[in-house]
Amino acid sequence: MLTQIWKVNEKTPDDNIITLAANVLKRGGLIAFPTETVYGLGANGLDESAVKSIYLAKGRPSDNPLILHIASLGQVFDLCRQVSLAAQVLMEKFWPGPLTLVLPRMSHIPDVATGGLDTVAVRMPDHPVALALIRAAGVPVAAPSANRSGYPSPTQAKHVLDDLGGRIDGIIDAGPTGVGLESTVLDMSGEKPVVLRPGGVTAEQIAAALNQEVYLDPGLANPEIVPKAPGMKYTHYAPRAEVILLEGSTEKIVEKVRELADHYKSGGRKAAFLLTKETWREVGKVPHVYSRDLGSRAQLSEVARNIYAELRASDLAGAEIIVTETYRQEGLGVALMNRLLKSAGYQVLKL
Ligand code: TXA
Ligand code: MG
């Protein structure tokens, strides 16, 4: 299969291209498109065989349900049989945006899209290209992140091409995505709101909007407990290289980075260093196969935006080991640490 690539302007995408891509979706094809979080791999969410082909292209386990992407608030009521007032408050406040709501589903949604669950995940992405595509397709667009299953999510069109080139019909390229981590998945189908996957909208923001306590799925903090979002139980977000997470004061991290860099060099091992601006300032130069400044600790949104691209770039540079740092688990730091811990297999080097 030849994968077409269409470059568009992020804010004012060409109508002809959007129509072309929407027509591919309508006839059951697969189109990767940008959202504000990461690139998604879209199919007509109501077409069973189109949705099946998403799993095939990604190599995704079939019990891992998809998010249905919509472009207007009204579409929620075509997909969900019960939309609580609290859910509506969140829709008004955070949509379009990086918040996915899990709600009781309607029965006409194909089981393949929901992993056979009694709920469905829905979100309205905050990206003009995604919204234009969904509108033109005229259907909810089922879309997981557009990576091969298990690998870090794509934040640039070239990541999608690397993973899925030849396996999908087309990619709409609107440049790098803004948030860089996947949306928050919030279960609103039960009695209390539960975060199943931390993301761009924080638990604190949700609690403030609802004026109600928000819970975290226990499976998030403890790798021994099976998480409620089926996707969170798999090895995920992991580059091929081994990831080493350093936790401690800047002084201790700096010392360890220098020590590790010398150690790997003398052992003939290829190491990448993905560190914060603050750490680099003290570290200076160390031997490496790849190294990058992820941004400042004071600007976690910058680190979040860069992290997946740099994990991928480290792999491409041939790194066997990626040395990086932990972050304080508050605000966006909760989502960032959730992904980093998974990519490191929950191993943290405490200094
Ligand atoms: O930012 C995002 O959410 C991106 C962009 C493309 O929108 N999409 C994304 O999709 O990250 P995906 O498929 O990679 O992750 C969806 C997550 C998975 O962990 C899945 O298990 C969970 O949402 N999920 C989907 N439907 C669910 C449901 N009914 N109940 C519980 N978890 C669900
Ligand atoms: Mg994914």
Image (cartoon, rainbow, N blue to C red):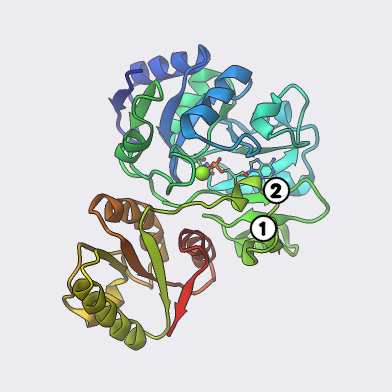
Mark 1 and mark 2 residues within 8 Å of each other at the beta carbon: yes
Residue at far right of view: 191
Q: Which mark is residue 343?
A: none
Which class describes the residues within 10 Å of circle 1: few (<14), some (14-19), or many (20+)?
some
Residue 310 in picture, x, y percent from top left: 31, 56
Looking at the rendered structure, the secondary structure element under dot 1 is helix
Which of the 4 quarters of the picture holds residue 13? top left
- Is disc 2's CB within 8 Å of ligand 1? no
- Frontmost residue, 46 versus 311: 311
Mark 1 vs mark 2: which is more N-terminal?
A: 2
The quadrant of the rendering that contains the N terminus is: top left
Q: Is residue 283 above or below residue 231?
A: below
Q: Is residue 65 visible?
A: yes
Looking at the rendered structure, the secondary structure element under dot 2 is helix
Q: Is residue 148 left or right of residue 107?
A: left
The residue beneath circle 1 is 209
Which of the 4 quarters of the picture holds residue 162? top left
The residue beneath circle 2 is 89
Residue 107 in picture, x, y percent from top left: 78, 25
Residue 104 in picture, x, y percent from top left: 78, 37
Q: Is residue 102 above or below residue 221?
A: above
Q: Is residue 144 left or right of residue 164?
A: right
Residue at position x 50%, y 34% from top? Answer: 59
The amino acid at mark 1 is: Ala
The amino acid at mark 2 is: Val
Which class describes the residues within 10 Å of circle 2: few (<14), some (14-19), or many (20+)?
some
Residue at far front of view: 267
Residue 142 in picture, x, y percent from top left: 57, 30
The quadrant of the rendering that contains the C terminus is: bottom left
